[in-house]
Amino acid sequence: MELNDSLKNRRMSISRLIKAPRHLVWEVWTNPEHIKHWWGPNGFTNTIHKMEVKQGGAWEFIMHGPDGTDYKNKNVFSEVVEGEKLVYNHVTGPLFEATITLVSEGDDTLVTMTSVFESEEQLKKVIEVFKADEGMKQNIDRLERYLAQQIKLFDHL
């Protein structure tokens, strides 16, 4: 019980039912040619340097902020379940573990993103300084919009 309470105070999570099949959600999440177009909060762009979606693989990229600030990021995948689950550790500050799960619900996909930080104080700080809670919401909004665009493109072929 105590561990769960402790985890709850260090966790930030969002779930959304997205109108896209799970295989497509997986593709746009794990392919650098797709993720560079939607990853991050509104106004951010990305340069992906490496994306090895496998256990022990690295995902290295720079997020370019709308104000011109560059944010170097490195993640290391600790678990990859094809089409269903990604777990990675963000090893450039702030440190956290992210888990992304994809669950098919008919033709749609329930996407859940969870980040667990080292401490309650660190979570409070990333929310206060970086607006990480709003950023997570914007990130899943961008994923949803990007998938809708991809489905429209596919439908026109």
Image: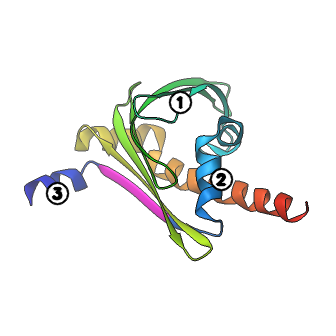
Q: Name the residue under label 3.
A: 4
Q: Is 136 situated left or right of 67 in this image?
A: left
Q: Which amino acid does label 1 sit on?
A: Glu
Q: Which amino acid does label 3 sit on?
A: Asn
- Residue 52's disc is 1
Looking at the picture, tell me which residue is in the foreground, 78 or 126. 78
How far is mark 1 from mark 3, CA to CA? 31 Å
How far is mark 2 from mark 3, CA to CA? 30 Å
Is residue 54 shown above or below 153?
Answer: above
Quarter of the image with the C terminus in it: bottom right
Q: Name the residue under label 2.
A: 142
Tag 2 or tag 1, which sits nearer the N-term?
1
Whole-percent x and y of residue 143?
63, 54
How far is mark 1 from mark 2, CA to CA? 22 Å
Q: Which residue is drawn at 47% across and 38% down?
A: 130
Q: Residues within 10 Å of mark 3 (few under 14, many from 20)?
A: few
Q: Which of marks 1 and 2 is in front?
A: 1
* Circles 2, 3 touching at the beta carbon (< 8 Å): no
Looking at the picture, tell me which residue is in the foreground, 12 or 108. 108
The segment highlighted magenta reads 11-15
